[in-house]
Amino acid sequence: MVDASIDADPEGTQEWEEALESVLAVEGPQRAHDLLGDLIAQARRAGAPVPYSATTPYVNTIPVDAEPPHPGDRAVEHRIRSVIRWNAVAMVLRANKESSELGGHIASFQSAATLYDTGFQHFWHAPSEGHGGDLVMMQGHSSPGIYARAFLEGRFTEEQMDAFRQETGGNGLSSYPHPWLMPEFWQFPTVSMGLGPLMAIYQARFLKYLHGRGLADTENRHVWAFLGDGEMDEPESLGAISLAGREHLDNLIFVVNCNLQRLDGPVRGNGKIIQELEGVFRGAGWNVVKVIWGSRWDELLKRDTTGRLHQLMEETVDGEYQTYKSRDGAYVREHFFGKYPETAAMVEDWTDAEIWALTRGGHDPSKIYAAYSAAVTEPDRPTVILAKTVKGYGMGEAGEGQNISHQQKKMAGEQLRIFRDRFELPVADADVDSLPYLQLGEEESEYLLRHREALGGSLPVRRRRSESLEVPDLSAFGAQLAGSGDRTISTTMAFVRVLNTLLRDKKIGKRVVPIVPDESRTFGMEGMFRQFGIFSRVGQLYEPEDQGQLMSYREDKRGQLLQEGINELGAMASWIAAATAYSTSDVPMIPFFIYYSMFGFQRVGDLAWAAGDLRARGFLLGGTAGRTTLNGEGLQHEDGHSHVFSSVIPNCVSYDPTFAHEVAVIVADGLRRMYVEQEDVFYYLTLMNENYTHPAMPGLGTDAEEATREGIVRGLYLLSEGESQGEAGERPRVQLMGSGTILREVMAAAELLESDWGVVADVWSAPSFTELRRDGIDVERWNMLHPTEEPRLSWVEQQLAGRPTGPVVAATDYVRAFPDQIRAWVVDRRFEVLGTDGFGRSDYRRALRDFFEVDRRYVTVAALSALARDGVVEASVVADAIAKYDIDPDRPAPAHA
């Protein structure tokens, strides 16, 4: 209503209002919507300011008369849901009977039980012959409820239920959704908070990618993500929702359980989280469905002729709503309805029990069914369902609507009996404290199984294996194996040529997914724009300015390249979607995600850990890597530690190759392991932008070729053997190791040692200190547990065993902790390590390598120092070298500079 005191034409305003009322009465709300839309558009075209509101009234989005009828037997479903509720509580309480050490969560699932049950009973398809299966990301803290349902389906035994959070024995149920721990059950890990919504968006987009490229029929599949309202504060939760809107991901559905509470207290005690989220999602182009009030409120809202109840609902903040549900009906009568005479009168003839029975929308199966129906039929837009619930619903004084709810792990005696009575459960008083697991009656069991059978079977379920691919042999990369001759190239360029070979392969080329976060030109990949196209659901609606050029920018509905913009987190989530397509869609895809390495593991480490849990398969490429190799950028860009990060992910296989033949061997081995043998590993390679000549693979075309290949894969091989002039035993000798571009400094140091100091140096390429360490740990463990058998040797020990005595020096473009991983297996030799500890700098490469003390001079001095401490050369020789190479021994250490 327009304020009459400032209305310049009250009579005209009244005419407009009456006209609108007439349209509503005669032609209905949709006609009014269309007319108002046309009027607003006309006003905008004329330049008139148009009122804007990001939110709609604080009532259900779907009017009562627009709700589809609920198709199920509400009474039977209530009984099923009640048994699931009990078993979920029993599971956690039984696990914590001995002590509270194991933990677990009760309140989260109790608030969301109806949200899950409605999906399981009526919407979520399992993979079947006629359906690819929906992808459902369960909220991690609700896992007890998911296990409780699976128990009723016969998927778990009581013994397994009692092994909740007892995972080391191999038969327990994991604390949260973890595909690594339960590879045939859980589809997605959703804890840590915020990763679920981000991954859901890119899983939905990748389904569109598969469909658009004709690789799979995903038209009838949906991605559902169950989220908490507190979780939406994570930047990752909302960071990519605009992509979902602009990409028109109508296959994506967020269900936000708005129980108004996070771990410590209210999510928005002084505001309204539902209204806040509605504005954010509407602005991003989503279809927003609010499910705030249960069916018992419908009568009251219909009788609200004065609008006072609507007003009260709007002005009450979430902190108050939470308090109401922690009290009782009398309290709600006094403190909510009692605020205004009009609202108090609406319930004056109601009992306190009837007031208390007014439920929130997220606990009403009919309201939830209507919202889900609207979501799956929404054309052209993703949907978010904002469902208002009560945390700890049904827990009463033990935790319903209380700030302690999330941490509550105890219910006993009278609290359990009240819970039992509230949900009419068949548990005798004498049995309550023993927390028996309940089974369904015959009618309920048949109903549950029949509904799941109609939807393709049980969920969640995960596919462990798909078809094995016929990948190209190593010989397909012959150009890389043969070296670059006199041409200078970088390992980045070597990789791009390997990638182009794979893209053109007739058998697997269509499965290769290049992914870049707006750095294609940096990595020399711009030629792929025109040749393979950039995926876009709408194609290219414009003519690019470089149209007609050889490397013009081309977007295409069937494009192969995923160009994610300046968005490493999104690109990583996109890579995860492709890397898990073998499981989610039974379509093995081969993703290659290349990025600035400094903005890789350091920025997306949480997602990389989730990728390991997800058993992702694919390649990550850290381009422009190395703290001294990416010159001219500086502290925030120069990566000297990503291999330390990658080393802690058990199934991430990491390499720092120096030469093109190493890149080729590593990629070929990764293809074999992931796509032929179907191992649940993923690969990380660092690539450099420094150009130099690349030698042919040692032993190429001879019997020694296989030994070189094995050495590359295992992480260490002899690149060159020092030549002795005179008696070998009379000359000092060292073993030099390196990786990445610093291996070339190591090779140069070998020449300095020979020419300036008469020291013989064998040079080793160490493409993976991380794999060497893992091998050493495995051997060490085997030896410890098999004391009566002949000890095994690690790969490092095997390689050094046949070499002459003398120290080992290792240098890389990464922090010292990276090569230092193998120290335990450099047996009976002094081991010196050089690295780039400290913050990066911008300068010429030669200056950076001098600053970080990893150039050929420092490698030479380190070798001489080790020989001196072994008593092989005099200490004065080291001093002479320091002077000869103009090294300042008193300057600050780079790690502290």
Image (cartoon, rainbow, N blue to C red):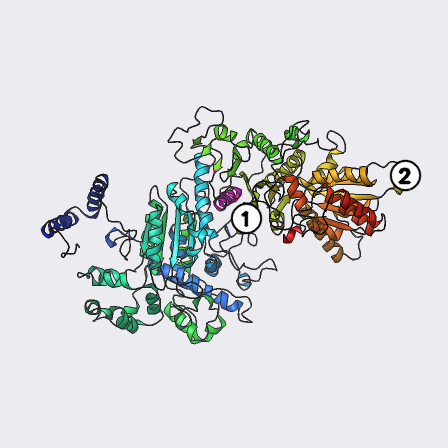
Query: Residue placed at 30% from the left, 60% from the top?
Result: 294
Q: Does the magenta stretch include residue 569?
A: yes
Q: What residue type is labelled 2?
A: Glu
Quadrant for residue 656, please give it: top right
User: Quadrant of the image for the N terminus?
Assistant: bottom left
Q: Position of residue 93 (x, y in %)?
A: 50, 68
10 Å crowding of disc 2: few (<14), some (14-19), many (20+): few
Residue 508: in sight, yes or no? yes
Q: Where is residue 662 in the image (x, y as percent from the top left)?
A: 67, 36
* Secondary structure mostly seen in the magenta stretch: helix
The residue that label 2 is drawn on is 727
- Horizontal placement of 690 versus 353: left or right? right
The residue that label 1 is drawn on is 611
User: Which label was assigned to residue 448?
Assistant: none
- Horizontal placement of 779 versus 332: left or right? right
* 364 shown above or below 131: below
> Which tag, 2 or 1, sits closer to the chain's start?
1
Closer to us: 437 or 187: 187
Q: Which amino acid does label 1 sit on?
A: Ala
Q: Are marks 2 and 1 in contact (CB under 8 Å)?
A: no
Closer to us: 877 or 47: 877
- Horizontal placement of 315 versus 837: left or right? left
Element under disc 2 = loop
The residue stretch that appears in magenta: 563-584
Q: Where is residue 430 in the image (x, y as percent from the top left)?
A: 46, 76
Q: Label 2 to label 1, Cα distance in Å?
A: 54 Å
Q: Does the magenta stretch include residue 677?
A: no
